[in-house]
Image: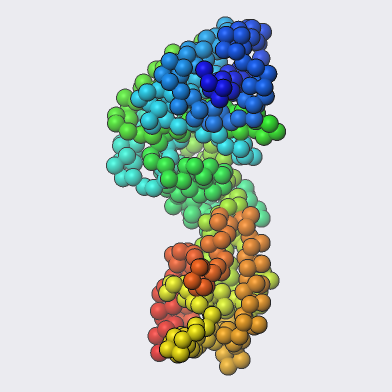
Amino acid sequence: MKSNERIACIRIFSDLIMADTVIDAGEMQYFDELRSVLKFTRQDEIDASAMTLSEAVEIMREADAETRGELVRRCRELSLSDGFCARSEALLIMAVTKALDNFWGEVSHVYSFPKQMFNIPTSCIIYIEGQPTEYIDSIVERNYRALFSEFRLAGFEFIYIPHVVGHYRDAEPGLMDSIVGFVAPKLSEEGRHASVEKLLKMTTAEFTKDILCNKLGMEALRGTTPALFLKTGISYVGDTVYSNYLKMDIEGDLLKDVHNFLDEFTSMLSSDVVIMSNNKEHRNQFLYTGFYKLLMDTHLMRRHVRSRVFINPFKEEIFFPDIDTVLRGLHRREKALYLTLLVLSGEGGVNFSSPDGARQIAAWNKRMARVQELYCRIYGLFGGDSDKAPDLTQSDIRRPMLSLIKRHVGKLADQLHDVGDYMVSRDDDGNMAVHLSPDLVMVRDTATGEMTPLALWAASLATLQG
């Protein structure tokens, strides 16, 4: 066995010993035997304590079949060395077994993420996907009741986001608003309405990206294919606690694969007694515990959110409804510049640096005149005198404005997911733009007073200018 494989084995054995939160004399005796047979050194054990479970599993995935088989066999023996295989131990063994299997290893992955304050229960198996996949979604939808029942018999709760959200939608009008206002009293009325609206439209893909990836930091799941996702336990790595997860990509016969997984899992358990909560969400009743509490709390958490941007020139306000925050610290001139650059970003941005050639300068001057005209128009919408709008072609005027925008948008880094998308940035060619999807930006229309998508609003503004 190679040195890195010994270290990986120690990490896996250590997590297995501590899985049930009890370190038994029988387990210590068996580990001493492993230490002797596999020639573990003290340095190996020190190095293993600094390795995550996912790193250990990845190392063992590269090992030969005999070494992988020995590890799985030793894990099963270790789990019974105290005379009892606990559920938490069986979960860890399943993660290792699936990830190292010649067949299942292609679709099974172990992840270790720093433990968050919001905790996914080990009793939950969640259907996730990075993007909507109609074919697999329809299979899960058709077989939901069968899947729910199969998992429940083994002590798991199957979480399928469309069914959770469907229950919320069936509530009496206004009830979800009241619940969200009660759970998160700091939210403004507008923020509360926006949160409820977004929750009632949440899809599996949005849950995966917004809740798991953005808010819980599970970036590795962002592009995942449809999969079943479950927590297998925790690891202590140095001074950091990690949560470990098994992801099983859905391929082939879903029900058959679920049956095989559950049969193998339950066959390891020393007890056939499964304790499951009888709590059930009835009409106009909502559980606020376990996964359901996590979903509600993390959805309402104003952190790492892919927020929309609502701009109201009449109120001189730039508002991020999904984090319930108004952009502070900017004057009228900076707010107008930010909206101007949002509009111009749809055209690739604007380069304020003058070129060298005479022909290029003529074209640049024409472009700058158009940019300045647009800015003056928007500056007037924000309540300023269009004829006295700052001259954007003057760097000593423009740069402090851009710096102020950057500083105050940057203050939202803890709340916005990828705050760089909301910043004014400059590419290698010198073009300045805000690389935010236009679909996320709404502007209050002058004529109708309604919030209008940025592209439509810009087109309307251009027509008025013409």
Q: Is residue 90 visible?
A: no
Q: Which of 418 and 398 lies nearest the eye of the viewer?
A: 398
Q: Is residue 463 left or right of residue 318?
A: left
Q: Residue at x 56, y 44 (%)?
A: 217
Q: Is residue 391 visible?
A: yes
Percent x, y of residue 46: 67, 24
Q: Indicate the colouring scheme.
A: rainbow
The image quadrant of residue 334 is bottom right
Q: Residue at x 48, y 48 (%)?
A: 209
- Count the numbered circles shown: 0
Q: Is residue 437 left or right of residue 37?
A: left
Q: Is residue 107 left or right of residue 59?
A: left
Quadrant, the C terminus: bottom left
Percent x, y of residue 142: 31, 36
Is 443 placed above or below 147 here?
Answer: below
Q: Residue at x 29, y 42 (%)?
A: 135
The image quadrant of residue 422 is bottom right
Is 293 placed above or below 301 here?
Answer: above
The image quadrant of residue 390 is bottom right
Percent x, y of residue 197: 48, 56
Percent x, y of residue 97: 45, 21
Residue sitting farthest toward the front:
357
Residue sitting farthest toward the bottom:
387
Q: Residue at x 62, y 48 (%)?
A: 183
Q: Which of 185 and 207 lies nearest the eye of the viewer?
A: 207
